């Protein structure tokens, strides 16, 4: 029941000449007899996830919206099937281990950069250009103002769309908000530590959790210290690759896994158990969680992630800010340093001060976080 197609846009939206990008478009037509002119549009997270793939799942969850409205899905430029900037250099047999050790290995990132630069102007794969593309699609299809929804990085895309095309938005729904004025990467370690501290306190206040894991904070410290002193080798099944793999869990791997587990209530509930098991010598459950999140990262368009991250996050961080921002946190400066290294030499353009400005709007909005 879907309508699928493409719409070409200029890669360089300012010059409007040269290379073009075929945007992947999917429309799920309204199921009712009298559809309204304002479709529902989903912006995926990452940055680097496919809005079409993520939006199809969201459309199933919010199927009632289709009774009166089309669902319009567009892969951002450089993601999914909109000229996806995928880095095969990061997807070899060691990709899971590379993620756990380095997040984005600088050597592989630079190799991907050098290959893509032969054909692609990487400086034009940013949020402003991506949402302007979607506005072109909206106009081309003759739709009225959109009902926008975004998750995580997708909320920043929604807010950017709202700033740049305020009359083209009817409503905004933001799930897991990343406001443009927030320095997401710089604040990551502190926010992760606060989330972990909150989980420890929540467990201590719950009779069952407190009784089962009375020393959760000390066990977390012990597991991180063990991984830092002597990385643990664990054999697990790589579900995505359908083969057994041997993973080395160093402190970076454990810290990243804890951070990703804190994203989800279900995985947060598992964290005390998996830490307790690792502290007792059974590292397999934690290793399985590590492999799971490493594979999730490998599904994203790394080139788009890098272009957005380098221009909109890393470029904003001053060296003098880092130590204070990461002090006394379990993640430390790992992510900041790794992303700064991966961004060395990555082409960017000046996005102006607007990229950090708060968005002020009268558009009705639903905000959800936590």
Image (cartoon, helix red, strand yellow):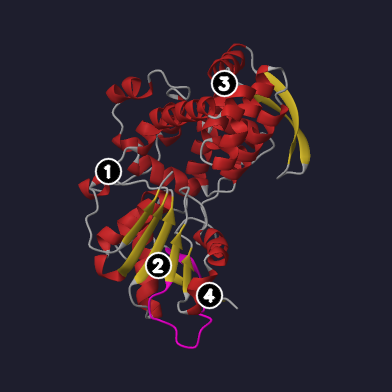
**What percent of the width, then of the height, locates residue 39?**
42, 74
- Asked if residue 30 lies in the magenta stretch, the reply is yes
Residue bounds of the magenta highlight: 20-39
- Pick whichever of labels 2 and 1 is earlier in the sequence: 2
**Which of the pair 247/111 is nearer the observer?**
247
Question: Marks 1 and 2: in contact by CB < 8 Å?
Answer: no
Question: Secondary structure under badge 4?
Answer: strand
Whether residue 193 appears in magenta in the rendering, the answer is: no
- Of mark 3 and mark 4, the one earlier in the sequence is 4
Q: Position of residue 175 (x, y in %)?
A: 42, 52
Circles 3 and 4: CB atoms closer than 8 Å? no
Residue under circle 4?
28
Q: Which mark is residue 216?
A: 3
Residue 262 vertical position relative to residue 122 in the rendered view, above or below: above
- Camera-nearest label, 3 or 4: 3
Q: Which mark is residue 9?
A: 2
Q: Nearer the viewer, residue 246 or 350?
A: 246
- Distance between the alpha carbons at the discs numbered 1 and 3: 34 Å
Q: Find disc 1 in the rendering and name its residue.
A: 181
Number of other residues with Cα within 10 Å of mark 2, as a class: few under 14, some 14 to 19, many 20 or more: many
Q: CA distance from mark 2 to mark 1?
A: 28 Å
Considering only order in the chain, which callout, 3 or 1, is on the residue closer to the N terminus?
Answer: 1
Secondary structure of residue under mark 2: strand
């Amino acid at each position: 029941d879907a309508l699928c197609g493409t719409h070409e846009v200029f890669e360089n939206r300012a010059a409007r000449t040269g290379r073009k990008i075929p945007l992947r478009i999917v429309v799920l037509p309204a199921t009712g007899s009298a559809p309204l002119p304002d479709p529902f549009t989903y912006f995926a997270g990452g940055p680097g996830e496919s809005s079409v793939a993520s939006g199809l799942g969201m459309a199933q969850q919010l199927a009632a919206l289709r009774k009166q409205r089309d669902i319009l899905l567009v892969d951002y430029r450089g993601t999914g099937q909109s000229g996806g900037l995928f880095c095969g250099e990061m997807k070899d047999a060691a990709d899971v281990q590379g993620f756990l050790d380095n997040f984005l290995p600088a050597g592989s990132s630079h190799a991907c950069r050098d290959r893509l630069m032969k054909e692609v102007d990487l400086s034009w794969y940013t949020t402003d250009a991506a949402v302007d593309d979607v506005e072109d699609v909206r106009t081309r299809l003759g739709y009225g103002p959109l009902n926008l929804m975004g998750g995580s990085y997708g909320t920043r895309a929604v807010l950017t769309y709202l700033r740049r095309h305020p009359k083209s938005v009817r409503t905004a729904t933001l799930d897991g908000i990343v406001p443009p004025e927030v320095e997401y990467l710089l604040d990551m370690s502190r926010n992760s530590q606060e989330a972990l501290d909150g989980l420890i306190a929540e467990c201590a206040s719950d009779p069952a959790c407190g009784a089962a894991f009375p020393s959760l904070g000390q066990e977390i410290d012990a597991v991180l210290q063990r991984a830092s002193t002597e990385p643990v080798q664990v054999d697990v099944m790589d579900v995505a690759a359908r083969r057994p793999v041997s993973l080395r869990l160093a402190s970076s791997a454990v810290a990243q896994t804890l951070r990703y587990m804190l994203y989800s209530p279900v995985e947060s509930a598992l964290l005390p158990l998996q830490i307790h098991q690792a502290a007792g010598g059974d590292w397999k459950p934690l290793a399985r969680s590590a492999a799971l999140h490493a594979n999730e990262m490998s599904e994203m368009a790394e080139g788009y992630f890098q272009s957005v991250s380098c221009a909109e996050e890393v470029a904003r961080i001053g060296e003098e800010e880092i130590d204070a921002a990461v002090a006394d946190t379990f993640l430390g400066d790992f992510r900041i340093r790794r992303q700064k290294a991966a961004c060395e030499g990555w082409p960017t353009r000046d996005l102006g001060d607007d990229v950090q400005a708060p968005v002020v709007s009268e558009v009705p909005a639903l905000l959800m976080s936590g």
